[in-house]
Image (cartoon, helix red, strand yellow):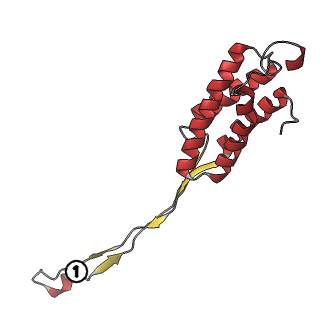
């Protein structure tokens, strides 16, 4: 991964933020409701009008699944994807570095939400995206060639 350029890391990170929008975010299984019994009645004076007991079966309620584009996390994913794509296409400056730092925070929130929903593919995508982008903007020692204007960052 260290052989990738800054532009490529940001672009791949943006793509990995868009990918979970189409993945299944959470599922709920279907279930069968219980039936019930309606008791007959022979309370009438004439026996011809007696009703028999009848059973009404339960109903199957199908499950559902929610994809990332329907979940609330889409706000964080779209923000991160747009910021990373913008930073990949433009000359990197301290302002874009701050934006990318905010995008890593949004990816972190999305990752935490994906972990809480047990969305395994989404967790994998977002973890790789963080692995690509975080070293660019959260270094302990500054690397002037990554996020400052100049020939090395273009």
From the viewer's perspective, tell me whether residue 33 is left or right of residue 110. left
Determine the residue positioned at 57% across, 53% down. Answer: 118
| In the displayed structure image, the side of residue 119 where residue 3 appears, left or right | right
Circle 1 residue: 40
Secondary structure, mark 1, is loop
Please say if 82 is above or below 16. above
Task: Give the image location of residue 53, x and y in percent.
Answer: 27, 81
Q: Is residue 67 above or below residue 57?
A: above
Locate the C terminus and report the quarter of the image it occupies.
top right
Residue at image location 71% in from the left, 17% down from the top:
96
Q: Residue 114: horizontal and vertical position, in percent?
A: 58, 46
What is the quadrant of residue 38 in the picture?
A: bottom left
Q: Is residue 114 left or right of residue 144?
A: left
Question: What residue is drawn where x is 68% and y is 28%?
Answer: 138
The image quadrant that residue 132 belongs to is top right
Q: Residue 154: in sight, yes or no?
A: no
Q: Is residue 32 above or below residue 150?
A: below
**Viewer-closest of 25 and 112:** 112
Q: Residue furthest front?
A: 141
Asked if residue 32 is positioned above or below residue 90 in the image, the reply reads below
The percent position of residue 5, horizontal first and vertical second, equals 86, 29
Instruction: Answer yes or no: is residue 72 visible.
Output: yes
């Amino acid at each position: 991964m260290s052989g990738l350029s800054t532009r490529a890391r940001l672009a791949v990170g943006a793509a990995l933020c868009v990918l979970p929008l189409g993945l299944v975010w959470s599922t709920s299984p279907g279930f069968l409701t219980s039936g019930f019994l309606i008791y007959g009645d022979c309370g009438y004076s004439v026996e011809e009008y007696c009703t028999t007991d009848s059973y009404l079966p339960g109903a199957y309620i199908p499950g559902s699944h929610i994809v990332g584009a329907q979940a609330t996390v889409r706000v964080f994913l779209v923000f991160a994807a747009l910021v990373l794509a913008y930073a990949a296409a433009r000359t990197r400056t301290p302002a874009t570095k701050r934006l990318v730092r905010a995008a890593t925070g949004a990816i972190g929130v999305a990752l935490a939400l994906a972990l809480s929903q047990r969305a395994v593919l989404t967790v994998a995508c977002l973890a790789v995206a963080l692995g690509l982008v975080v070293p660019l903007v959260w270094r302990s020692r500054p690397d002037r060639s990554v996020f400052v204007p100049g020939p090395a960052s273009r």
